[in-house]
Amino acid sequence: MAFGLKKLILPLITIAIFAAVWQLAAGKYPPEQFPGPTDVLKAIKELADSGVLWGHIGISLTRFGGAYLLAVTVAIPLGLFLGSFTRCHAAIDPLIQVLRPISPIAWFPLAVLWFGIGNAPAVFIIFLAAFYPVLLTTISAVRAVPKVYLMVATNFGAGSRMTFLRVIVPAAFPGIMVGLHIAVGTAWIHLVAGEMLGAQSGLGFMIVDARNFLRTDQIMAGMLLVGLLGLAIYKGMKAAESYIGRRWGIVA
Amino acid sequence: MSAQVTAKIQLAAVEKRFSSARGDEQIAVSQLDLDIQAGEFVCLVGPSGCGKTTLINMMAGFDRPSSGSVVIDGKTVTAPSPNHIMIFQDYGLYPWRTVLGNVLFGLQARGVPPAEAKGKALAALELVGLLQSIDKHPHELSGGMKQRVSIARALAVEPSVLFMDEPFAALDAFTRLHLQDEVLRIWTEKKPTVVFVTHDLDEAIALGQRVVLMAPNPGRIQRILDVKLPHPRERTDTDFAVFRKQLFEEFHLVHRQANQTAEYMI
Ligand SMILES: Nc1ncnc2c1ncn2[C@@H]1O[C@H](COP(=O)(O)OP(=O)(O)O)[C@@H](O)[C@H]1O
Ligand SMILES: [Mg+2]
């Protein structure tokens, strides 16, 4: 009962109040300027019925998933490597520190120049957005592996391969998970930016397209869907995390 | 047997110096000589900072002396060995492995075939009384149980020396007494050489055949006490009290000296 109240009823009340305030505020302006929640829901239905919505969502999710996986498969091995070899890290860290503060969006002009309009610039921007958080958390997770874990491994005569695969990687895993988690958020945010700038499809493009036709209701519909899908991905990530946490023997 | 039986562990003029960030040198262990016989149970006791950890780390091969030599079984110690296992105060268990998985680790590292490894691991877990918890993860265990797992992990590889650095310092008094008895039982059964570091004088008297009292600044041996009492020892015996009194008096001497040096330095 208390569980239902906290997890379901309280958030529902907040959403209801938010929608009510939104509806009231929107009532004071023409719908082309500030549509209310009912207008936006109607727009979503219209987009869904015409079929364009599913195409855009599918493309966005594919780009997001592909770029994210690509970033993770590059960043984790690189992070494990740089975390394990202090000298390589010392050599490369300054470069990372200079490149990292550059917003992925700042890469956009170059990305379009190099890859042209289409999938590639958006994928490139999502890749960058996911890459740094995963890389940096992986490096620090490896460096934070308790010294006693390594002492135990050497004491029992574990070779460097076993120490790496069976001690360092699993010990760093919870830290890497945090990076994966952060990266999902940043990557999703940059997906929309990437698609608004350089793509001809996807949710970001759908929002830009709606602006070109002055369909304010569809702009908001796009924004709302980006938010909802982001929430769904985040929840999925959480579930995966607590499952892995249990498998790993760490209290979630 | 010849009269000249070489000791299991031989420390000769062992010295360890650390230089601080400010550049001045500190002598953590100074010109220390000690022989430990095979199968002996030796306690190193002393106030914190007197170099106990530094010394046991050198014996276990985690650290090298600045000068002098550490020899085990006639060979100079240059690296840790699966034949000499260290038990840490904070257990060093791998949280992602189950109890059984942790105990298997050392056997896997040595490439023992899985079926044989499992048999050895279970036998070691039986010895520490943890057979009913083999599928649990470390976070589900009490501190005392965690330390039993790490003892089982060590026993599974059948080391000839067990190094223990304040293994029970983080445990409550009841658990500590209980584990002291367990360690004695296991030692009586398996007869490894045990080097046991503690800052608890009672623990040292209860366990050690010899108690090595160390003094700080620089870390050195103050006195070696032969505790000629059979195991298991009754902590309430008058004989026990006699040794206890000796050790405490000697310890107070160390303390007074340490305080005097401190005053002198101020
Ligand atoms: N890695 C190190 N670097 C510098 N000083 C150290 C280091 N390890 C220990 N020491 C110093 O050596 C002395 C002995 O330390 P330690 O062996 O840990 O003592 P104990 O275990 O008896 O408490 C202490 O004064 C400590 O500060
Ligand atoms: Mg210590």
Image (cartoon, coloured by chain):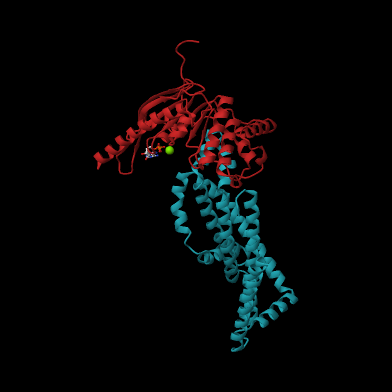
Does residue A24 lie above or below A160 as drawn?
below
User: Is residue A97 toward the left or the right of residue A61 in the image?
Assistant: left
* Residue A151 image position (x, y, % from top left): 51, 37
**Chain identity for the colour cyan used in the image:** A
State which image quarter holds ligand 2. Answer: top left
Which of the two residues, B90 or B110, is positioned nearer the viewer here?
Answer: B90
- Examine the rendering and report whether any part of residue B13 can be seen: no
Which of the two residues, B203 or B139, is positioned nearer the viewer here?
Answer: B203
Question: Toward which corner of the image does residue A237 lie, by quadrant?
Answer: bottom right
Position of the C terminus of chain B by quadrant:
top left
* Residue A181 image position (x, y, % from top left): 58, 59
Question: Which residue in the rendered view is the most extreme toward the front?
Answer: B238
Which of the two residues, B15 or B35, is positioned nearer the viewer here?
Answer: B35
* Residue A170 image position (x, y, % from top left): 59, 46
**Chain identity for the colour red used in the image:** B
- Examine the rendering and report whether any part of residue B119 can be seen: yes
* Residue A64 image position (x, y, % from top left): 63, 62
What residue is drawn where x is 28% and y is 40%? Answer: B262
Q: How many marks?
A: 0
